[in-house]
Amino acid sequence: MSDNVGRLLESFGVMGLGMLGIFVVMLILYIATFAVSKIRKGE
Amino acid sequence: MDALFGNLLNINYQQAIMWAIGGILIYLAVARDMEPSLLLPMGFGAILVNLPMSGAITQQIERLVGGVIQTGEEVGVLNELYAAGIANELFPLLLFIGIGAMIDFGPLLSNPRMLFFGAAAQFGIFFTFSLASLLGFSWQDAASISIIGAADGPTSIFVANYFHSNYIGAIIVAAYSYMALVPIIQPPVIRMITTKSERLIRMNYRQKDVGRLVRIVFPIIVTVVAGLFAPRSVALVGFLMFGNLIRECGVLGSLSSSAQKELANLVTLLLGITVAVNMQADKFLNPQTLMILALGLAAFVFDTVGGVFFAKLMNLFMKEKINPMIGATGISAFPMSARVIAKMAIEEDPTNHILMHAVSANVSGQIASVIAGGLVIKLVEGLIR
């Protein structure tokens, strides 16, 4: 039983880190895209 | 007589079931036009590999050598193709060059906030990972099964192969079948979790000019950023973005055209039939296959749920509301999902055209699904160690 609970918690950890990781990457891409488009407009 | 008819006695009922499954896949491809470029070769391949003593796959056969009967291995052509293109992940990566060359990131770049919907709609992958591990699958198999939710064939093949999953045949059949079934899966889920007034939210599309510099720099930035966070995804992301860079650079028109047509078609031709190596009856017909099909469906459902609820969350903070159905298009099934949601919006209100927003989020999902694949590999490797 405790094995299953431990396993579930570990999988939730993967879930949390995975979703956080994707959002962080997308945020960086968002900022980078925004920055490049502003640089272009400034030229 | 035995030489002529002896092999008929080698037919077993499991092989006959696989012939039927192969026939169903061919029917879905031809009569229903469901992902025909993959389902037809897979269906035919399923029949090929399930004929008794099939010469298409590796067999232990008896040969007469110097008057003595010897048992030896005869390597089948499909196993050769598998080793040459699937086991080393070459075919999915080459296909990604073609897919990258086909994608226009313009709608996404003119509305970059749609990047986050692509992220949100990968929720089903991680939810299904938890569910699969709870059902007793190993970490590697749970990761391979969960990546069905990426709604992306090459990513599914890449991750399942990376973890040497025993269920790669069922995973690939599930991934491609559910991608084709998006018009059936998504609408009822969306109607269940949204209200009519939410589905009627209008979104204005303002055409923004996306500069050539942005179009060229974007695939490079995506590769670098994704590679730093999920190094195992560099091959997947890199090849996808390489294809896109060929398209957007403006000086490699013939290469771009070849990538979109000849390369993509050739690889697709070989990929589908080669994947059938894993559809041999003894590997495919087991209770786990049914569980995998159910888990794959759950992945798609919760991808949709994740995207829609993220849109609702965004609406709490935004003046210009987002139609929550857009969240569902963050799934990587491009362009099917965008068309389905745009059609749903028009059914609710014939003057509400949200196709360009849907396409933006859908294209974002393509990027997010590949990153998700890399993150799944990285995080699950950490669990195993």
Image (cartoon, rainbow, N blue to C red):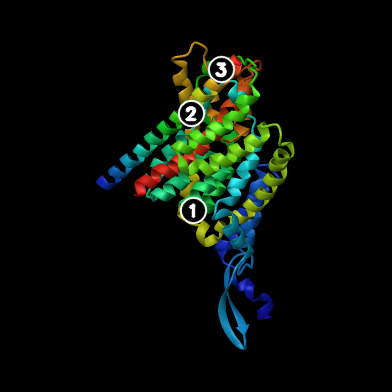
Residue depicted at x 56% and y 33%: B220
Q: Position of residue A42 (x, y in %)?
A: 58, 15
The answer to whether any part of residue B181 appears in the image is: no
Kindly identify the amino acid type of the residue bearing the numbered disc 1.
Tyr
Q: In the image shown, does A6 or B116 lie closer to the viewer?
A: B116
Residue depicted at x 62% and y 67%: B54
Q: Is B227 situated left or right of B91 in this image?
A: left
Kindly identify the amino acid type of the residue bearing the numbered disc 2.
Met
Q: Are marks 1 and 3 on the same chain?
A: no
Q: Where is residue B201 in the image (x, y as percent from the top left)?
A: 55, 15
As drawn, the residue found furthest toward the left would be A2
Badge 2: how crowded within 10 Å, few (<14), some, or many (20+)? many
Badge 3: how crowded within 10 Å, few (<14), some, or many (20+)? few
**Residue under label 3:** A38
Q: Marks 1/3: CA distance?
A: 47 Å
As drawn, the residue found furthest toward the front would be A43
State the image quarter where residue B250 is shown. Answer: top right
**Residue under label 2:** A26
Q: Marks 2/3: CA distance?
A: 18 Å
Looking at the rendered image, the disc whose residue lies closer to the viewer, 1 or 3, is 3
Looking at the rendered image, the disc whose residue lies closer to the viewer, 2 or 3, is 3
**Residue under label 1:** B167
